[in-house]
Amino acid sequence: MGKSMLTYFDFAENDRLFFRQAYDNGIRGGYLAALGQNICERYLKYIVDEYVTPETENERYAKASILRTHSLRRLAGYLRDDVGIQLQEDTESALYKIDGFYFSTRYPGEDSFIPSERDVDMANYAVEQTRDDVIQICAELHRHSGEMEYENGTENEQDEYDDLDEEEEDYDR
């Protein structure tokens, strides 16, 4: 049996395990702020990569462009405005609070800073909110996709994303 290609979700979950272990052991180092943003970014990019199917050249360009951004604000806006997927208000607010951590906490510049414990706490909250929201959104998209397949008279084949809740439990172990 061949190896399946890793997804943004897989990488987000892998980094979340490290984040959780460090955070749960009282570590509030600056790297966690940047990592928190990056994890959220990967969860959002997972939706774009797996569920957005561009039909025009402009849509293909927009998808390729959004997959290169590090801006959580742009990702959330793309999902809302271009795809029609609205994140929960708490999730979007949490994302906006940590947007920019990826660069501003890692490189010197006008906007750079050393993250505080509160910043790392905000990153933690954003990671958990985003993860929960993305799992819920993907489960709904997958259910809707299965309904469409059934309506079209084709068999609804199981794939690796059939039950994101089971996958969530696997990553939490």
Image: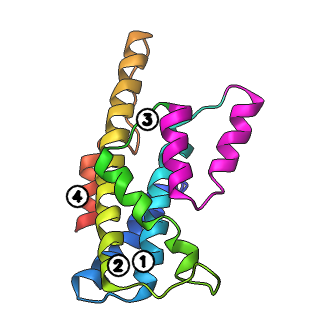
In the rendered structure, the answer to whether residue 112 lies left or right of residue 124 reads right
Magenta span includes 107: no
Residue 85 — which label?
A: 3
Label 2, residues with CA under 10 Å away: few <14, some 14-19, many ≥20:
many
Amino acid tagged 1: Ala
Q: Is residue 65 above or below residue 20?
A: above
Residue 19: give x, y in percent of width and height. Answer: 35, 77
Q: Secondary structure at mark 3?
A: loop
Q: Secondary structure at mark 1?
A: helix
Q: CA distance from mark 3 to mark 4?
A: 24 Å
Counting the numbered discs, the total is: 4
Q: Which residue is mark 1?
A: 33
Residue 39: give x, y in percent of width and height. Answer: 44, 65
Q: Are marks 2 and 4 in contact (CB under 8 Å)?
A: no
Q: Is residue 7 visible?
A: no
Q: Are marks 1 and 3 in contact (CB under 8 Å)?
A: no
Q: Which residue is mark 2?
A: 120
Q: CA distance from mark 1 to mark 2?
A: 5 Å
Amino acid tagged 3: Ile
Amino acid tagged 2: Val
Tell which of 147 and 114 is nearer to you.
114
Magenta span includes 63: yes
Q: Which residue is mark 4?
A: 169
Q: CA distance from mark 1 to mark 4?
A: 25 Å
Q: CA distance from mark 1 to mark 3?
A: 26 Å
Residue 23: give x, y in percent of width and height. Answer: 28, 81
User: Which range of residues does the magenta coloring cover?
Assistant: 55-83
Residue 95: give x, y in percent of width and height. Answer: 41, 58
Amino acid tagged 4: Glu
Q: Are marks 1 and 2 in contact (CB under 8 Å)?
A: yes
In the rendered structure, the answer to whether residue 14 lies left or right of residue 110 reads left
